[in-house]
Each structure stands twice: as structure tokens, then as C-alpha cells.
Image (spheres, helix red, strand yellow):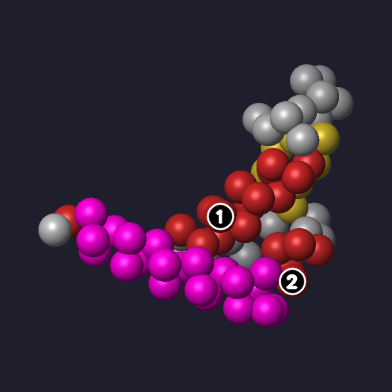
Amino acid sequence: MYPSQEVAEEVLIESWSRYNYGHGQGPVAVYQCDDCGRFHLTSKGLMNEKLAAAIKDGTIKLRKEANKWGERLKKK
């Protein structure tokens, strides 16, 4: 659960930066829950515009590389 759409979208992008989702896997959008009013990630529906842009412009790829190096440095 996330307090705003902006936070949920950032978590969505970060999750794509940390995990290797295959085609048709992983969350692709955010939605506001009718029950709690907070935002959640979902693997259903159309891909979120900010996520699609982050994939297209290389942001996801750059973050994946940064995460990889961060993990390597933690091990030392």
C-alpha cells in the first residue's frame, strides 16, 4: 500500500530496476483501492506511462546496472 500515486509509480519503476521480470510477469500499473483509498501495484491492465517511459529511455537499464554495482560493493 502506498500513500500516493507518485510513490506507487516510483516503487513500480524501482521494482523493475531490481528484479528481472519476464514478458507478462511482474507489476505493470498502479491503481487506487476502493476499500482503503491507498495505491497498489498490479500486473493487470495497460502498462503505466511512467514505467513505459523509463523502459524506453533507458532509466530501468541504468538503475539495474547501478543496483548490480551497489550489491557488489556491499559484498566487499
Relative to 36, residue 10 above or below: below
Depth order, front residue of 43/37: 37
The quadrant of the rendering that contains the C terminus is bottom left
Residue 42 visible in image: no
- Residue at left offset 52%, top offset 75%: 61
- Residue at left offset 42%, top offset 67%: 66
Q: Secondary structure at mark 1?
A: helix
Q: Which residue is mark 2?
A: 53
Amino acid found under the numbered disc labelled 2: Ala
Query: Which comes sooner in the sequence, label 2 or label 1?
Result: 1
- Residue at left offset 24%, top offset 63%: 72
Q: Position of residue 51 (x, y in %)?
A: 70, 63
Q: Secondary structure at mark 2?
A: helix
Relative to 8, residue 75 above or below: below
Q: Position of residue 74 (x, y in %)?
A: 23, 54
Amino acid found under the numbered disc labelled 1: Glu
Q: Is residue 76 magenta?
A: no
Q: Position of residue 18 (x, y in %)?
A: 46, 58
